[in-house]
Image (cartoon, rainbow, N blue to C red):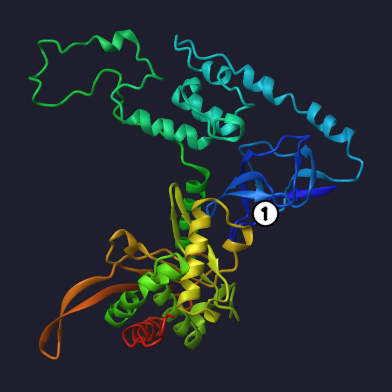
Amino acid sequence: MTDVVMPQMGESIVEGTLTKWLKKPGEHVERDEPLFEISTDKVDTEIPSPAAGTLSEVLVDEGKTVGINTVVARIQESGNGAGPKPKAAEASRPAAPPAAAAPPPPPAAPAPVAEAPVAAEPAGPLSPLVRKMAREHNLDLSRISGTGAGGRITKQDVEAFLAQQSAQPAAAAQAPPPSRVAPAAPPLRAPAAVTPVPPAGQARTRIEPMSTMRIKIAEHMVLSKRTSAHVTTIHKVDMTKVARMRERNKAAVQAQYGFSLTYLPFITRATVSALRQYPLINASIDGNNILYHNEINIGIAVALENGLIVPVIRNADEKNVLGLQRSIVDLAGRARSRQLKPEEVQSGTFSITNFGSFGSMMGTPVINQPQVAILGVGTVEKTPVVIDDAIAIRSISYLSLTFDHRLIDGALADQFMTKVRQVLEDWSEDVL
C-alpha cells in the first residue's frame, strides 16, 4: 500500500487545497499519471500518482485544505492482491453523491435555482467549493458547461460563467422579482439625464469569492511585508549592446531552437554574475543567523490567468544565455499548462519579476520569502539620452532591486546593481 501525501509546493507553504480528484476509488492509475489537483499561493497544478495500482481509498474530499505531508489517499500497488479492497472503498463513498443530489432547501424566496445546480450534475458530485459558489451567487448550474473529468463542473467553469454574466445587463441565471422590474420612472424623479439608473435587476456590485491561489498569494504578500524591512533602489541601464546582440541572433535562435530570444536571459545572466560577487544577496535569514546558499537558484515570476507562480531555474550560474532562455520558456510554458512538478517551485535563492513585458517602466516588487531580495525588470525602450554633450538614441531599461534592510544595507544593494548594470552595458558574450 502506498500513501499519497499533500506535497510541499514551496519553502514557505504549509498547506494546500485539494481542488479535484482526477480518479475515483477503485480506478486504476499509472505511476506519474495525474491523480488530483491542488491549489496554493504558488501553484495551481496536477499532482502525479507516486505508484501504479488501484486507488483504494480517498481520505481528503475536494475543496478541503490540509497541511503538507498529510495522507490524502492510498494506492494498492499492482500485484498485491487488492481485488476486493477497491470495491469496499468505492462502496464506502456513496455518501457524497446523495449529498450532492439533496441540497438544503432554498430560502423562502420563490427562486428555484438553489436546487437546479445539484440536479444538473451528470458527471459525479460537485466539489464543496462549487456548491458554495452556486449558493452564494444563486446559480443554475444546468446552464454551465463542465470542463472537468467526465464533464464535471469545476471552480474555473463557475468563474468563467460569472464573468460572462457580469457582461450582460440581466443575467438569465438570476431572474429578478417581478416587483422590482416595474418601477418605470415616476414623474417625481429628476430628468433621465441627471443620473443613469442601472437596468432593472442589475446589481451595482458583484461579489465573487477569491480563488484559493489568490487567497494564498494575499497571505504570502502580507507575511512578506510583516517579515522583511522592504527598501527599493532603481537603476537606469543602457541595454543598447544587449539589444544589438539580441537583434543579431534572434532569427537564428528561433529557426534553430523554436523559441524567441528575449531580454530576460541576458538580465538573468548579469544577475548571476553579481550574486557570485555579492553572496549576501543570495542568502536568507534564520532567526539571528545568516544562511549562505552555495547554489544560485533563480526564481522567474510567471503571470497566470488567476495569479502568479515563481518556478525556479536551478544552478542558474551553470547556464549561458541560450540555456537560460530555454529554461525560462520551458518553465513558463509548463506553469501555464499546470504541469510543473512540486520541486520546480522550491529552493529558490533569488527572484526576478519581468513586469516590463506588460509595458511597465519600473516597480517595487515584494520579496519572495524566505529570500532577501528580488529584481524587477522594466520595459526596454529607445530613449534620447545625452552622451558626451550630444543627444543619442539608446535602448534604456530601469531595473529595481527590492531588498530586506534587516540584512542588506543600501550601499551593498547599489554595489550589486552597479555590477548588474556594468555587465549589461559592457555585454560581449556570444549567444550562439
At label 1, counting other C-alpha atoms closer than 10 Å, the crowd grade (few under 14, some 14-19, many 20 or more) is: many
Q: Is residue 103 above or below residue 210?
A: above
82 left or right of 6? right
Front residue of 17 and 229: 17
Q: Quadrant of the C terminus?
A: bottom left
Residue pictured at 75% horizontal, 39% vertical = 59
**Element type at marker 1?**
loop
Q: How many labels does the image show?
A: 1
Residue 42 location in percent, x, y?
53, 55
Q: Quick check: can you spot residue 263? A: no
Residue pictured at 53% horizontal, 56% vertical = 334
Residue 134 location in percent, x, y?
50, 26
Q: In this view, does 111 lie above or below 274?
A: above
Residue 292 location in percent, x, y?
58, 80
Residue 9 location in percent, x, y?
61, 57
98 left or right of 247? right
Q: In which quarter of the image is residue 293?
A: bottom right
Question: Label 1 belongs to which residue?
Answer: 7
Residue pictured at 55% horizontal, 51% vertical = 338
Furthest residue toward bottom: 388
Q: Quick check: can you spot residue 271? A: yes
Furthest residue toward front: 255
Q: Quadrant of residue 172?
A: top left
Front residue of 323 and 7: 323
Three-letter code for the amino acid on which mark 1 is drawn? Pro
